Image: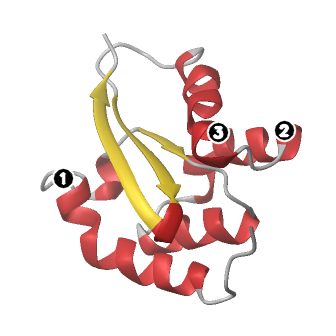
Amino acid sequence: MHLSGQVPAELRNGLAAAGLRIAHGVEPTNIDLWAVHPGGRTILDAAEQGLALPPEALCDSRTILRQFGNMSSASVIFVLERMMQRARPGQRGCAMSFGPGVTAETMLFHVV
């Protein structure tokens, strides 16, 4: 599969427009944990920019990308596993995975 070079820009724009809806009215920067599908460096850069996240917000996604590459939509499970090893009770998180046609699936969660 080969993605168009337009995908990162479209993803960035779409996430910028939908950030508050994705986070159910919470500013994305107030979400503690971000598990974003590591679909490639430019995909992670686009998510970071579109949601106006600090660079460290996607450190787990970037680590999984470096270690295993893009394993398709299921990659986010590897990110969640790594993230939950250091998560603290009460933190809010958002998991996000991308699929065919550049669809985005998101899930909000709380660490207990």
Does 72 sit left or right of 88 as displayed? right
N-term mark: 3 or 2: 2
Three-letter residue code for mark 2: Phe
The residue singled out by tag 2 in the image is: 68
In what quadrant of the picture does the N terminus appear?
A: bottom right
Which residue is drawn at the image coordinates 66% and 38% (left, top)?
A: 60
Residue drawn at x 63%, y 67% is 43
Q: CA distance from mark 1 to mark 3?
A: 25 Å
* Residue 23 relative to residue 105: left or right: left
Q: Which mark is residue 26?
A: 1
The residue carrying mark 3 is 75
At mark 3, the secondary structure is helix
Say which element carries label 2. Answer: helix
Task: Name the amino acid, label 3.
Answer: Ser
* Amino acid type, callout 1: Val
Residue 62 in the image: above or below residue 91: below
